Amino acid sequence: MRKPITVYKGGRGLYTREDPVRLEFDGENGVNGLAYAVNVVCSDTGRISRRGGYTKVSTDVYHSIFPYDSTRFLGINGSSLRLVSVLDFSYTNIATVTEGAKGSYARVGAMVLFVNGYETGIIENGAWSDWVVGTPSGRYASKKYYGPPAGTLVTYYANSVFIAEDNVLWYSEAPSINLFRKASGYLYYGSNINMVCPVATGLYLSTENRVRYLGGKTAETLAENILTDYPAIRGTDVLISGLVVGGNLRNPEPVCVFTTTEGICVGGSDKVFGSILFDNLTRERFDYPSGSEGAATVIDNVYVVNIYK
């Protein structure tokens, strides 16, 4: 009697860098690589299920969305920065911003900092205030300070605010968020910065041609480690628990997951792993569409990314 062959019971994930006829075939267990997949999710155990659908809940169009609290998010509609309820999608216009400019946010305590290349602001208690230079005192009094530059990316690390403006990464004088020194408080790169993602002991930074890790306890002591010769795609970075990513990342410390032109990457913290742990999770498996911008989020512990030109 001929032995039956199990054609398919599960998937090992998507593989587009291989000729489909050369994909590994397991006739014993039926767990095989996928050459093509549409609207499905492949779990760590190989289970294939239909991707969840969606329901339109609002006719308003938003970009630059950021979670403000458990029931509201920040988003830009036209030239309005809005605070929007996730319960009924009612909103409050809190600021007028430059239409078409993508916003970037950083949470510092009860405040959310905002930049978009034109405007800078602070959202606190649901209200907007201009983000301006502070009044230096004490050890700061003898130095010349400026307000935050109108950069396109903002983040917070080691008690300093970091703002990317073209190919310059400015940082504030710790622990202040509104004292910037143009004479010395910056890091300069050869091409524009398109990602700055903080982890416990440093920053993952991408320019237009490579990804770097900047490690150090303060902004002034950051040391550079070049990780790739290809860039991250702007807008695709998220922070997620290492427990979710799995593999060698079985630790709740947040890690940075982002999409590059060569695949989805994950970067951890040397506080957790003893050394920088960085990996391209998908480079050997499938190609990505070309694009200069994207958007990403985490849904049910799954990293979801959309890439567009």
Image (spheres, rainbow, N blue to C red):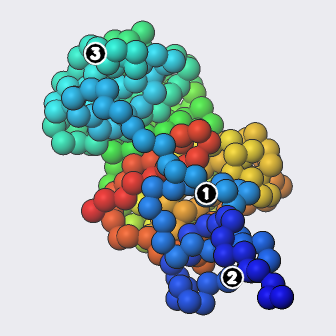
The x, y position of residue 246, in whole percent, is 74, 53
Q: Position of residue 292 (x, y in %)?
A: 33, 63
- What's under tag 1, amino acid-wise? Ile
What is the distance, in whole Å, between disc 1 and disc 3 at their CAs?
38 Å
From the viewer's perspective, tell me whether residue 128 is left or right of residue 217.
left
At 62% from the left and 42% from the top, the residue drawn is: 301
Q: In screen coordinates, is 180 left or right of 78?
A: right
Q: Nearer the viewer, mark 2 or mark 3?
A: 2
User: Callout 2: helix, strand or loop?
Assistant: loop
Residue at coordinates 66% horizontally, 70% vertically from top-left? 8
User: In front here: 277 or 201?
Assistant: 277
Give the answer, above or below, for where 165 lies relative to 229: above
The answer for how far apart the CA atoms under marks 1 and 2 are is 16 Å
Name the residue that disc number 1 marks: 48
The local secondary structure at tag 3 comes to strand
**Residue 217 in the figure: left or right of residue 108:** right
Which quarter of the figure has residue 151?
A: top left
In the rendered image, residue 184, in percent from the top left (x then y), is placed at: 46, 47
* Numbered tag placed on residue 91 in the rendering: 3
Q: Residue at x 62, y 84 (%)?
A: 23
Q: What residue would you read off at disc 2?
A: 25
Nearer to us: label 1 or label 3: 1
**48 lies above or below 290:** above
